[in-house]
Image: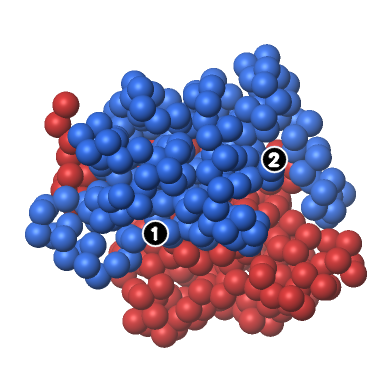
Chain colours: A blue, B red
Amino acid sequence: MEIIKDPLEIEKRSMEIIRPYVKDIFTDEAELKVASRIIHAAGDTDYAKIIRIHKEAIEATKKAIISGKNVCTDVEMVRTGINKKKLAAYGGEVLCKIADEEVAKKAKERGITRSMAAMREFGEKLTDSVVAIGNAPTALFEVLRLAEEENILPAVIIGVPVGFVGAAESKAALMKNKKVPYITVEGTKGGSPIAVAAFNAILYQI
Amino acid sequence: MEIIKDPLEIEKRSMEIIRPYVKDIFTDEAELKVASRIIHAAGDTDYAKIIRIHKEAIEATKKAIISGKNVCTDVEMVRTGINKKKLAAYGGEVLCKIADEEVAKKAKERGITRSMAAMREFGEKLTDSVVAIGNAPTALFEVLRLAEEENILPAVIIGVPVGFVGAAESKAALMKNKKVPYITVEGTKGGSPIAVAAFNAILYQI
């Protein structure tokens, strides 16, 4: 068996394999690239049917990046995966508070998850930022609450928390929100690589 | 809708939801925990049918951890996700060479992926270590080549590269190898959270 060792060739072939699964669902080229990268990151073509991209989401993300806005995320794996060098070229950085001592303390006091406390701790910093949630449904619920109750509005929410407790519900709530454009996937699937793939796919299109 | 905010309760409910999907496939309790955490990390119960755990893999991983061996990985996201504090308590650390300048240079010279060059760069350091591959099929192929041709034998290979170009083939080759116990998934699915979930699930059982 011959192993393909050229990274550009791997990328090209991969996108060719994915294309038939997405081409009739995503007619917009920018959205098609986002969907393709998500499928690539998961190795799972079933994502084609569950990816939901708000019509303003990609432009809003591009605008935020170009304006030097930050990315606020719930987990370190998302921070690790995002192309920070390219993001920094526009002035933005990736912020994550999950490991902050203060956040851990507040989470314990309030009986909530650290991810939730971390989002609350961001507070006004979420305004006009790109929110990328790759793990915790509670983090997404909290961002939606901040938008609804405190009118703290991110530029876009890439919300793909994963799992069987609250993930599907949090993403359904995201899709129902009328204030912030979003990128998400329906159901229980998701995770850090999905958030990273969606974000980087847009970053690479600027 | 009531949001469950207690992390322990979320974990417990999640495992209860996953259990019916795995209980008849994995009769060994340690394997069942690994499989459950993988499904939890992917939000995808279809993993139950594709997870493959070599009968010596979990014990080999435990032994390596307790002996203070390192984890060698192909991508930073795996390093980020592994519970390094708990691993360090036994003396081990997580090593990743993907961002090394020297590795990038050698990859370019040889016309191979950086992941592949990074594994070659580890060389003898892979011996008795836990290899965790969450992204690149080429990295897994290279580790298998080192085992086969140079008799460099890790304690275990957690090999779950993802994607449509080489991933399924690299994992099929992993399952065929007779030298090193493995944890893997069949097909195109996989990724960093899957490698992390498998490793942490064993770490938490020690």
Residue highlighted by disc 1: A96
Q: Is residue B144 left or right of residue B36?
A: right
Q: Is residue A70 above or below residue A199?
A: below
> What's the residue type where badge 2 is placed?
Gln
x and y percent of residue A83 in the render? 61, 56
Q: Earlier in the sequence, mark 2 or mark 1?
A: 1
Q: Quadrant of residue A90?
A: bottom right
Q: Is residue A93 left or right of residue A111?
A: right
| Residue drawn 77% across the image and 70% down it | B104
Mark 2 surroundings: few (<14), some (14-19) or many (≥20) residues within 10 A: few
Q: Label for residue B202?
A: none
Relative to the observer, which residue lies in front, A103 or B66? A103
x and y percent of residue B5 in the render? 17, 44
Q: Secondary structure at mark 1?
A: strand
| Residue drawn 75% across the image and 35% down it | A15
| Residue drawn 75% across the image and 38% down it | A14
